[in-house]
Image (cartoon, rainbow, N blue to C red):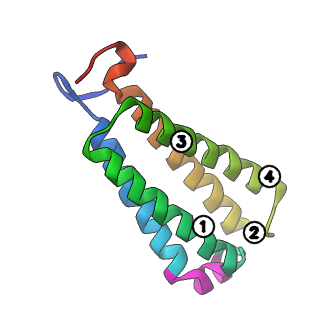
Amino acid sequence: MTDITLTQGRSLLRPALIVDAAVTGLCGVAYLAAAGPLEDLLGLPAAWLRAAGAVLLAFAVLVALASRRPTAAAVRAIVAVNALWVAGSIVFALAGWGSPDTAGTVWIVLQALVVAGFAELQVASAPWRAGRTS
């Protein structure tokens, strides 16, 4: 796998973490602030959306903090949580838990793909992956 860099010697890791935190935080705020309308749109229970929103906000804060000075352990943990979210989302969509309507199922799969993209970018751009330290 090729390292992904912004410019020679500059990793995309910090920007990838920052965008992950921002998108995750925005979804968390949306789930908390608009759980009722999103319940109608996606066919998912508002209580579940609020719970997911709280979890997403907490995770966004942790990712934002880790982006300031990313360590190998922090990035591995973030990637692991992202991978678990992706796997859980796919299982959730396939099982039809919460009885999502078509829009809800599509949303669950799309957000899982976005999270998978963040995880892949974080892994690919981690400088220590190839033994580098910067």
Residue 52: assigned label: 1
Real-space Cα distance between discs 3 and 2? 21 Å
Give residue 95's position: percent from left, percent from top: 83, 55
Real-space Cα distance between discs 4 and 1? 18 Å
Q: Within 10 angstroms of label 1, few (less than 14), some, or many (20 or more) residues?
A: some
Q: Earlier in the sequence, mark 4 or mark 1?
A: 1
Does dot 1 land on a helix, a strand or a loop?
helix
Say which residue label 3 marks. Answer: 116
Give residue 83's position: percent from left, percent from top: 59, 40
Q: Quadrant of residue 54?
A: bottom right
103 sits left or right of 68 in the view:
right
Q: Earlier in the sequence, mark 1 or mark 2?
A: 1
Foreground residue among 134 and 41? 134
Does dot 3 land on a helix, a strand or a loop?
helix
Q: Earlier in the sequence, mark 4 or mark 3?
A: 4
The part of the chain drawn in magenta is: 33-41
Say which residue label 2 marks. Answer: 100
**Which callout, 1 or 2, points to the residue nearer the camera?**
1
105 sits left or right of 113 in the view:
right
Say which residue label 4 marks. Answer: 94
Does dot 2 land on a helix, a strand or a loop?
loop
Instruction: Work out whether 54 lies above or below 134.
Output: below
The image shows a total of numbered marks equal to: 4
